[in-house]
Image (spheres, helix red, strand yellow):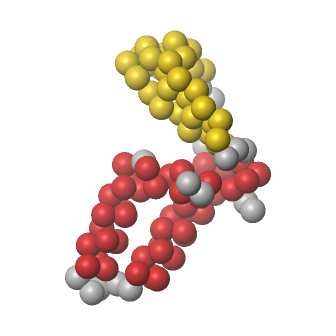
Amino acid sequence: MATFELYRRSTIGMCLTETLDEMVSNGILSPEHAIQVLVQFDKSMTEALETQVKSKVTIKGHLHTYRFCDNVWTFILQDAVFKSEECQETVNRVKIVACDSKLLTQ
């Protein structure tokens, strides 16, 4: 998986991919143009996270699984507690995918 493709597995990324696939199938959009839209989506998500997100969150939980492959860390936590200044939320199971932000700009 290329580092830019991290956001494609989010809900909005999967919906965008499904919509683009349907548009290509119906002849509304060329496959090349659909790929360009996905690449722009990935870059926009990276830029938005770097420039617009100011909140900090603390995460605590039971580390079920971790993996480091192709400079990407994947963590699966159980009974994770997310704490911010405003609220606290507990999640039964969460998957966190993290990579070096410098790799995203290459």
Residue furthest toward the left? 26
Would residue 23 appear left or right of 103 to someone viewing this image? left
Residue found at x 71% / y 48% = 101
Residue 21, position in %: x, y?
31, 71
Q: Quadrant of residue 57?
A: top right
* Up/down of 40 relative to 79, above or below: below
* Up/down of 18 relative to 83, above or below: below
Front residue of 98/83: it is 98
Q: Quadrant of the C terminus?
A: bottom right
Residue 95, position in %: x, y?
48, 31
* Up/down of 84 relative to 3, above or below: above
In this rendering, does residue 83 appear at all?
A: no
- Report the number of discs: 0
Front residue of 69/18: it is 69
Residue 86, position in %: x, y?
51, 22
Residue 1, position in %: x, y?
56, 54
Residue found at x 37% / y 64% = 17
Front residue of 54/2: it is 2
Would residue 106 appear left or right of 46 to someone viewing this image? right
Residue found at x 50% / y 52% = 7
Residue found at x 34% / y 71% = 20
Q: Quadrant of residue 39?
A: bottom right
In this rendering, does residue 13 appear at all?
A: yes
* Up/down of 85 relative to 17, above or below: above
